[in-house]
Image: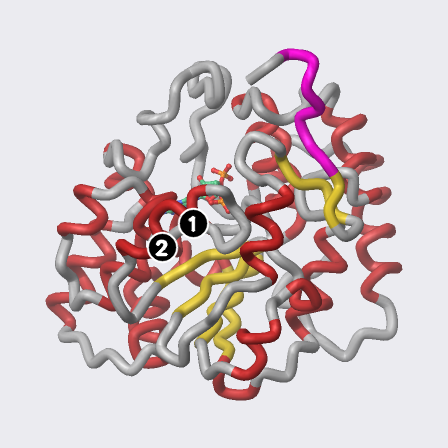
Amino acid sequence: MSPEREKCFWYRGLPVPAETHSLDSLRFAEDFSFRDEDVLAVTYPKSGTIWMQEILPLVLNGGDLTPVQTIPNWDRVPWLEEKRLALVLDQLTSPRALVTHFPFDLMPPSFHTSKAKVIYVMRNPKDVLVSSYFFHQMATFLDDPGTFDEFMDKFLEGRVLFGKWTDHVKSWMKAELGDRILYMTYEDMVEDLPGSLRTISHFLGKNLSDQVIDKIAETCSFKTMKDNKMSNFSLVPKMYMDSDKSPFLRKGIVGDWKNHLNPDQLARFCSVIRKELEGQSMSLPWSL
Ligand code: A3P
């Protein structure tokens, strides 16, 4: 990574990291041919993306641990918009599982005409903010976040990866994909992982026994993922991700925001988010 290169560039109004994305990779994503049997997990960054990269292969393969134990998460369930996709696409077996941070309006035409299924995972934005702040400290291919206060301003203004949280959530909440989309929350997954896995399995047409569900829940628990080198980013050189500054799998809890936002910051944060969601018919599972 050359030090003078800009760490992020803007694509269709959204900041994206140059280390992992290029104009070619983004165009590749916009021209991507979805198949009916594809499964796509969609998240705003720091909402549970790598968790879904663990869960989807396990559910789709009936609890077979081989993919999560032998293939790094970014290759087993690649990002639609990242450079890696073109390199590994041919190796993906059907049904293909992918993830994306794209807002709904950037989805390629083939997505709209296909029957590909979508699992949209959202997380309380206060915890997204905190997780993102620590991620920016460890991911040296991103700009230094500065102080928490400075980073919060950037987050609220959408000068962070993939823009504003509110825009992302609004775009997918009004997607009108009928039974092609399943909405999940990070909080529900933390509270009841086996139950969430049953919901996901059912949505994907997989009838898994309690025994298999328990095995999957154990494999994609925070602790097991933290110890799995195919999932914890320890294979990434320290010059790109420095887990001494903050591990990627950092805390994996609900409500860490209480340890980081002071009353003024909390009021400012909630007032901006509330205002931007005003007039939306969607109901969110957290109070803001
Ligand atoms: P924290 O920083 O709050 O710990 P993403 O994959 O979208 O970048 O999201 C990363 C966040 O999801 C991190 O949150 C990470 O710890 C959390 N996460 C990943 N796997 C998890 C799991 N199995 N259980 C709970 N949280 C998990």
The N terminus - image quarter: top right
68 relative position to 151: left or right:
left
Q: Residue at x 75, y 30 (%)?
A: 151
Where disc 1 sits, the SS reads helix
State which quadrant residue 281 falls in. Answer: bottom right
How many numbered marks does the figure carry?
2
User: Do labels 2 and 1 touch, CB within 8 Å?
Assistant: yes
Residue 153 in the image: x percent, y percent?
82, 35
Q: Is residue 153 magenta?
A: no
Q: Nearer the viewer, residue 116 or 30?
A: 30
Q: Residue at x 56, y 20 (%)?
A: 140
Magenta region, residue range: 3-9
Residue 8 among magenta residues = yes
Residue 195, picture quadrant: bottom left
User: Dot 1: few (<14), some (14–19), or many (≥20) neighbours within 10 Å?
Assistant: some
Instruction: State the quadrant of the C terminus.
Output: bottom right
In the rendered image, residue 76, in percent from the top left (x then y), is placed at: 30, 50
Q: Which mark is residue 89?
A: 2
Identify the colour scheme used: secondary structure
Nearer to us in this view, 104 or 86: 86
Q: Is residue 123 above or below residue 252?
A: below
Which structural element holds mark 2? helix
Q: Amino acid at mark 1?
A: Ala
Q: Amino acid at mark 2?
A: Leu
Percent of width and height locating residue 81: 54, 51
